[in-house]
Amino acid sequence: GENVEQHPSTLSVQEGDSAVIKCTYSDSASNYFPWYKQELGKRPQLIIDIRSNVGEKKDQRIAVTLNKTAKHFSLHITETQPEDSAVYFCAASPQTGANNLFFGTGTRLTVIP
Amino acid sequence: KAGVTQTPRYLIKTRGQQVTLSCSPISGHRSVSWYQQTPGQGLQFLFEYFSETQRNKGNFPGRFSGRQFSNSRSEMNVSTLELGDSALYLCASTPRGAGGSSYEQYFGPGTRLTVT
């Protein structure tokens, strides 16, 4: 089955700096890669996603890149703000048309004011 | 549109009992997936339902089961509870589920199950 690895497990940055979280996946058939943000005690929220036919996607301060050959994808947050502090999860969907996600182990991001 | 709702939000059970959790997807969403979240194992896929049929199943024992009703609402059941079943159980709904590319999943607030 699909195996998603995520690094780092914790990340601290100064407000205004950039943060990068990296994930690798094992199943070359995976074709959908979402990122979720989970604040303490709250539900995971979809913040951005990318499909296997796209190499990069950007939404304001957030961007995701995908390298299918190397089977890795990354989340980039620029101009970080204290409200970006949360746990971020990457995920991969191994089947076209299926809605089962395999998640990474999460990155706890702390933005220091 | 109202978001995904789950009931109950909190539940305390004893070992050996069984439990049923409920999930109401976003109106119009036909696919419901269930996940277990624990500090040790993270977020793990349990199963997915579409049009009242289980379409995918994760690597969990048969004590974990589910079903979906004609209105897309879904329930999951855990029988013979074990201490290790203590977790946050999340459901997620997706706007489409029949073929094509995978679609965005929107999570409910979860049900926090504690087994004592």
Image (spheres, rainbow, N blue to C red):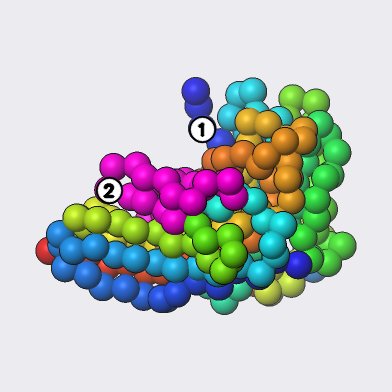
Q: Position of residue A108 (x, y in %)?
A: 37, 69
The chain carrying label 1 is B
Quarter of the picture holding the C terminus of chain A:
bottom left
Span shown in magenta = A37-65
Q: Residue at x 77, y 41 (%)?
A: B49
Looking at the rendered structure, the secondary structure element under dot 1 is: loop
Q: Is residue A35 left or right of residue A68?
A: left
Looking at the rendered structure, the secondary structure element under dot 2 is: loop
Q: Position of residue A11 (x, y in %)?
A: 32, 73
Q: In this view, does B24 lie to the left or right of B72?
A: left
- Work out whether residue B52 can be spotted: yes
Q: Which of A77 and B72 is in front in this view?
A: A77
Q: Do the residues labelled 2 and 1 touch (CB within 8 Å)?
A: no
Q: Which residue is drawn at 45% across and 74% down?
A: A7
* Residue A61 numbered tag: 2
The chain carrying label 2 is A
- Camera-near label (2 vs 1) is 2
Q: Give the Cα distance between marks 2 and 1.
A: 25 Å
Q: Position of residue B84 (x, y in %)?
A: 68, 74
Residue lying at the far left of the rendered structure: A113
Q: Position of residue A78 (x, y in %)?
A: 24, 56
Amino acid type, mark 1: Gly
Q: Name the residue under label 1.
A: B3
Looking at the image, is A62 positioned above or below residue A113? above
Marks 2 and 1 on same chain? no
- Work out whether residue B89 can be spotted: no
Amino acid type, mark 2: Arg
